[in-house]
Amino acid sequence: DTIYAVDFGLSKFYRDPKTGKHIGQREKNLTSLVGTARYCSINSHHGAQLSRRDDMETIGYVLVYLACRGLPWQGVKATNLPEKYEKIGRIKEQITTAKLCAGLPTCFQRYIDYSRQLAFEEEPDYEMCKEMFRSTFQHCRLKNDRIFDWTGVMDRGSLTVSIIEARNLMGKESGGTSNPYCTLWLSSLGKKRMTSTKVVYSNL
């Protein structure tokens, strides 16, 4: 029983396919935020060209979200989306990583600090980052049984898929209904254990 979620809508080459050279850094080249405001990097809020370091920072926010069930900038009130994005970006810049990762193992703060100090073209030390969490996992004597919080959903009679926010490359809201860059594949769910599938669209 496997769910395959595929979305390459915002992916791009960070190296020129022909020359192999890293893409150039252009400050404030983008007119709209790239990615989901909740998780995107600080550079994305500034409209800067993005690179591998920004992907690493985004992963950090996702990890904190999963560990804490939320992020400090969720629920920000604003009269429009640009204002909301600006407020979220300001909170990300002002909050210390110590406060952001309060109550979590130190590897979370160390990871985000590391991702933020990377240079634009610098290759992240992926193995070191994995070792941060791997060593913490072992230190806490946790069991790697490959069973996650959401694993049990496969034993229920139905599956609800919620597409919180889907946008096309122009940044326009599509509600997930007409976005060619947002693709959700549900396969191998099994007829015996999965009796129905419901897709819910809810824009924030």
Image (tube, grey):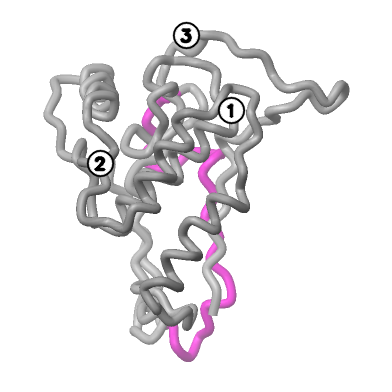
Q: Which of marks 3 and 2 is in front?
A: 2
Q: Nearer the viewer, residue 134 or 51?
A: 134
Q: Quadrant of the C terminus?
A: top left
Q: Quadrant of the N terminus?
A: bottom right
Q: Is residue 115 left or right of residue 8?
A: left
Which x, y percent locates residue 155?
A: 38, 86
In the picture, the disc for residue 28 is: 3
Confirm whether the magenta stretch covers residue 67: no
* Residue drawn 47% across the image and 79% down it: 144
Q: What residue type is labelled 2?
A: Ala
Q: Which residue matches tag 2? A: 98
Confirm whether the magenta stretch covers residue 182: yes
Label 2's element? Answer: helix
Label 3's element? Answer: loop
Up-down relation of residue 155 to residue 40 (above or below): below
Q: Nearer the viewer, residue 185 or 99?
A: 99
Q: In terms of image quadrants, where is residue 68?
A: bottom left
Q: In this view, does 135 lie to the left or right of 22?
A: left
Q: Are there few (<14), some (14-19), or many (20+) residues within 10 Å of tag 3?
A: some
Magenta span: chief secondary structure:
loop
Q: In terms of image quadrants, where is residue 111?
A: top left
* Residue drawn 47% across the image and 83% down it: 145
Up-down relation of residue 87 to residue 187 (above or below): above
Which x, y percent locates residue 132?
A: 48, 56
Label 3, label 1: how far apart the Cα atoms are: 14 Å
* Marks 3 and 2, the one that precedes in the sequence: 3
Which x, y percent locates residue 75?
A: 15, 38
Q: What residue type is labelled 3?
A: Lys
* Marks 1 and 2, the one that precedes in the sequence: 1
* Residue drawn 57% across the image and 37% down it: 9
Q: Which residue matches tag 1? A: 51
Q: Nearer the viewer, residue 42 or 172?
A: 42
